[in-house]
Image (cartoon, rainbow, N blue to C red):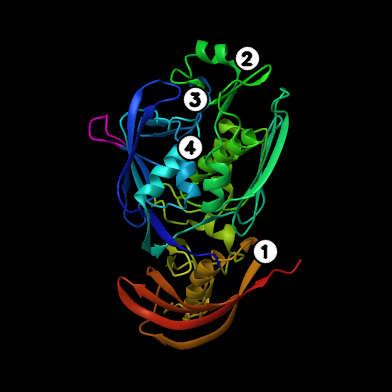
Amino acid sequence: MRTRPQRTIAQPASIEGVGLHTGEKGTMRFLPAEVDHGVRFIRVDLAGAPEVRVRPENAHFDPGAGRRTILQQDGVQIHTMEHVLAAVAGLGIDNLRIEVSTMEVPEGHDGSSAPIARALMAAGLADQVKPTRHIKVTKPVHWAEGRVELSAVPYDGLRITFQIEYDHPAIGVQERTLDITPEVFLEQVAPARTFVLERDLEALRAAGWIKGGRLESAIVVGQSGVLNDEPLRFPDEFVRHKILDLIGDLFILGGPVLGHFTARRSGHQGHVAFVKRLKETLPLPGRRAGGSPEEWDTTAIMDLMPHRYPFLLVDRILRIEEGAEIEGLKNVTINEPFFQGHFPGQPTMPGVLILEAMAQVGGMLMLNSVDDPSNKLMYFMGIDGAKFRRPVVPGDQLRFTVKLLNAKRRTMKMRGEAFVEGQLVAEAELLATVVDRRA
């Protein structure tokens, strides 16, 4: 079970630079943020300093805006933030406020994430009191358009395989697989610079792009090879920069990801489309219209849990603290099939089903903590100290809080409590294990 504390920076840091495409000079200021804040950009150049959250529903790709990713919330845009998000993701930062003075994030002078990563490291990384919530690939996901392909499969960590293919002898076909840790990111990914073919420069300028581009801010590849004074930092620096871009674009999911991601001939447009496919396909919070970004609705729950009608007894997960605690809801209605016989004329929810609902909420905590949960089941092993304080009847809403007491390999002991309108109605300690599903 992979857990680590949430992380922010210990003190403010800032970077000044020029937007690669707009050419506007700007400042980017990094500020510590509280637990569960996530990463947000703040446009301090606009009235009211509006925020743009890093969320998949805010991701946008505009073919007329060039080779960049865009975040947009309530009409407010942030452009070209992928190198910033790559540094945030690569260093394992969960909570951060990023104040920007222009629409486009100013580049860190060399077309890589290294200056941004150095600024964040100089500010210091600070662990926080709650565990991070990883976004896990729980089943294979695939997206393709033309010759562009992206896929993801479960993996205990973040592994990226990227293949590029350019009709240019200085680049050609390159492929690299890396397991991304902060150390690997700093040493092998962050220094990789963006690149452009010299033959494409005029078309890009004619389209109004790369107004802030300089020979020092990208690798320029001419007919005879690299035109920069500085040689390549890696023999395969081109594909490493593509890995950097994908790390940044994947963070748009809203937090750190776990899985093995494979990309072939992809760019920002494909990355954004794939992020949206992941959002639709994986059991992720935030699907319910009007709900909290932390909530899991029934469809997301069923992506993770094997239970179905009439034995799925969880309607919503309100929050998950990975490897620690979970809170969920069960709406009790007269349509429950067990009320036909328990009891006619005085419908009462069986205590054993209250415990089952409590265990299913705990099961979401367990399955969210293991690799490849779509191929796992949770089995009850024991119940201790079960107590029922008052009957649960149609019209009640059960709110469950389940806390992890200890975990050994795939066996976990949890304490659950059930409330109706703030009143404790049931409690128990639950022992359960995770097993492989039979083929």
Q: Earlier in the sequence, mark 2 or mark 3?
A: 2
393 on left or right of 202: left
**How far, Cα to Cα, is label 2 from label 4?**
24 Å
Q: Earlier in the sequence, mark 3 or mark 1?
A: 3
User: Can you see residue 313?
Assistant: no
* Badge 1 amino acid: Asn
Along the line of sight, the residue nearer the viewer: 361 or 259: 259
**How far, Cα to Cα, is label 1 from label 4?**
35 Å
> Within 10 Å of the Cα at label 3, are there few (<14), some (14-19), or many (20+) other Cα atoms?
some
| Point 40% across, 81% down: residue | 426
**How far, Cα to Cα, is label 1 from label 2?**
49 Å
Q: Which contiguous range is marked in magenta?
A: 42-50
> Helix, strand, or loop for circle 2?
helix
Which quadrant does the C terminus fall into?
Answer: bottom right
* Badge 2 amino acid: Arg
| Point 47% across, 50% down: residue | 91
The residue identified by callout 2 is 199
193 on left or right of 22: right
**How far, Cα to Cα, is label 4 from label 3?**
16 Å
The residue identified by callout 3 is 216
Dots 1, 2 in contact, CB < 8 A: no
From what the image shows, is residue 415 above or below residue 396? below
Query: Which circle, 1 or 4, is nearer the viewer?
Result: 4
Q: Earlier in the sequence, mark 1 or mark 2?
A: 2
